[in-house]
Amino acid sequence: MPVNILMPALSPTMEKGNLAKWLKKEGDKVKPGDVIAEIETDKATMEYEAVDEGTLAKILVPEGTPDVPVQTLIAVLAEEGEDVKAAAAAAGKGAPAPPKPPPAAPKPADAAPPRPAAGADASARAATAPSAAPKPGEPPRAAPAQAAAPKRGDGEGARVAPTSRVFSSPLARRLAKEAGIDLARIRGSGPHGRVIAHDVELAKSGRGVMAPAAAPAAAPPVQAPADEKILALFEPGSYEAVPHDNVRKVIARRLLEAKLTIPHFYLTLDCNIGKLLGAREEINAAAPKGKDGKPAYKISVNDFVIKALALALQRVPDANVTWTEGAMLRHRHSDIGVAVSIPGGLITPVVRHAEQKSLSIISNEMKDFATRARARKLAPQEYQGGTSAVSNLGMYGIKEFYAIINPPHATILSVGAADERAVVRDGKIEAAHMMTVGLATDHRAVDGALGAVLLNAFKALIESPVMMVV
């Protein structure tokens, strides 16, 4: 039977992806491990590997197609010995149709609230609308978040199996058995929802595991009437309507979820970084040079901040936690996410075990992360998870701000600009290099007093950088 190739879920939060490029064409032989396509997620461009052997019989979603929902049928593979033409002819029967390209953005002159259409125009509009309006007397219907995903074994040509069976590769079964993980709780990203080795690796770190309880309700989508009310406030032709891209949609959804579900609590401290600036200058001056004459590393203030927060979390382990409804997760290591600005939004690559790494390693790791983040080349495991985060707007001259917590973190440190200020010491006014930092905490996990202890531990380290190497 032909094998249906579905749009994979390359990360636990992925709902849609852009099919950027096919690396195999119809008629090509495919074996497990071959990279057959490139998928653009909201954060990165990922390679899609085949898990079955056969011939690529039919491509149903052409390259360049945006916003393809997860589990949409994108191609069909004919197995060894199977008639390729027959498999191609049967492709797509009983499976959800691939998405159509989004309509062009409305011109400014056409941006006024639309009037009801009649006749054939109304029928065509209803056929392409994302959700139909309820008829009089009917209860309102919510628009679906994405196209309905086929169940394992659904559709003509799919392998039909008892509901208790979990499709998985032999390697995935072996890895899951070794790790003591129930395959039925792992979210599969292969064809037919098949569990592959990558899914098991995600499950080992607590990601991609389906909880037995129902998932929390997503924030309600913005309805078209609300848009019309906003548009009515502005003169037609006085603005340009720029459609949201995937990155901005995901950022909006996650930050709204964070502010609605996490009780934020804020704390502020001023840190004297005079000694840190002196140490930084001395360390960078002593950096060895490579064959190209460039220094092996160049430490920034932000590298000190990452290291200091990591060590502070080790000194205050009760703050190095994640809140879940069933238990508090107390982390052994300090995995520090660092907000990096990318075109259209931001991403938070994670410096793993930052408390164990030297400043030079943290510095070079962050430079690599930033370069690949802006090229959208980070792997999901490089920006998912973490135990806390740093957001630094000091480079933009911002003195003080409060960042929004990035789930599943319980804290985030916001770092302002370092500048020379007048301070009073022993009754005398002196000039000192001061930096204002703010800490936002999830009050369910880290209350005000505990957050204050953590922030003071950070202050002690950042003001005496020699303590970071003891």
Image: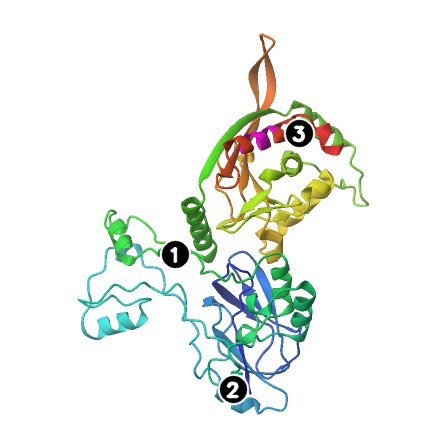
Residue 461 falls inside the magenta stretch: no
Q: Name the residue under label 3.
A: 461
Image position of 434 with respect to 19: above or below: above
Marker disc for residue 88: 2
Residue type highlighted by circle 1: Pro
Give the residues in magenta: 451-456
Residue closest to the eye, 363 or 219: 219
Q: Distance between the residues labelled 1 and 3?
A: 45 Å
Residue closest to the eye, 451 or 23: 451
Q: Which residue, as the protein is rendered here, is positioned at the far top?
A: 427
Whole-percent x, y for residue 79 in the image: 60, 86
Q: What residue do we see at 57% from left, 89% from top? A: 84
Q: Is the magenta stretch mostly helix, strand or loop?
A: helix
Res. 340 visible in picture: no
Residue closest to the eye, 392 or 231: 392
Whole-percent x, y for residue 142 in the image: 31, 63
Q: Distance between the residues labelled 3 and 2?
A: 64 Å
Whole-percent x, y for residue 301 in the image: 64, 33
Residue type highlighted by circle 2: Ala
Res. 288 visible in picture: yes
Image position of 263 with respect to 382: above or below: above
Sequence-wise, which precedes: disc 2 or disc 1? 2
Q: Mark 1 points at which residue?
A: 243
User: Which quadrant of the figure has residue 102?
Assistant: bottom left
Q: What residue do we see at 50% from left, 65% from top? A: 18
Q: Helix or strand or loop: what does disc 3 sit on? A: helix
